[in-house]
Image: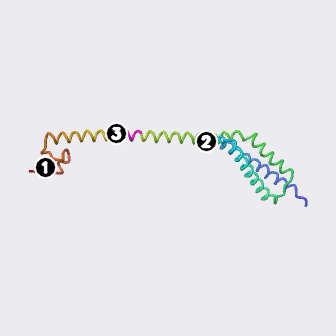
Amino acid sequence: MIEPVESQAFTLLVTVLTGVIVGVFFDLYRVTRSVLGLGPVATAVGDILFSLFATTVAFTFLLATCWGEVRFFMFLGFGAGFAGYRAVLGRRVIGGAVSVVEACHRARRRARLGVREASFRLRRAAARVRKTAARARRRVAAVRRTRPEAGVVCGPLRLLHPRRKG
C-alpha cells in the first residue's frame, strides 16, 4: 500500500527531530564522559549503552509515527537531523553543559571553603570561650585563696545567694 506524501513528510520530519534529540543526548553523554574521566573499558561500555539508548529512542519514534516501518529516507532523516544539530547547535549545547558542570564545581568548592571558614571561625570562637573560662577559673581560684569567706559563689551571683554566716 502506498502512503500519502503528507504522511511520509511527517515521518521524515519526525526522523529529523529524532536525529536532533539523539544528537543532544550524545553531546550530553560526551560531556559526562569527559567530566568523569572514564577509562577505555568504561568508555566502550558507555558507548554501547548509548547506542542501545539511541536505538531505543529511534525505534520508539518509528513505532509511534509509522508503525515501525523502516524506509531509506528515514535513515537520511536521522542522519540529516544529527548532522544539522551538530553543525548548528552542537557547540552551544556542549558549551552550556560544560558551563553548568563548571558552575557546579565552583558552587561545591565555595560550599567546601565556606564550611571550612565557618568551622575555623567556630574553632576560634570556642578557643576564645575556653580562654575566657580559664581566666575566670583562675580569678575564682585566686579569690577563694585570698578571701575564703566569699565561698563558692562570687560575682553577680552573690546577689542571688546571700553569704552564709558561719
Is residue 123 found inside the magenta-colored segment of the image? yes
Residue under numbered circle 3 = 127
Task: Quote the CA–CA distance across marks 1 and 3.
Answer: 33 Å
Q: Quadrant of residue 65?
A: bottom right
The image shows residue 29 at horizontal and vertical percentages of 68, 45
Residue at 75% across, 49% down: 51
Asked if the residue at tag 3 contacts the one at tag 2, i.e. Cβ–Cβ closer than 8 Å, the answer is no
Q: Name the quarter where the N terminus is drawn.
A: bottom right
158 vs 81, nearest the viewer = 158
The image shows residue 50 at horizontal and vertical percentages of 72, 49
Q: Going by the image, does 58 lie left or right of 95?
A: right
Which contiguous range is marked in magenta?
120-126
39 vs 88, nearest the viewer = 39
Q: Going by the image, does 148 lie left or right of 19?
A: left
Query: Circle 2 — which element?
Result: helix
Task: Quote the CA–CA distance across marks 1 and 2.
Answer: 68 Å
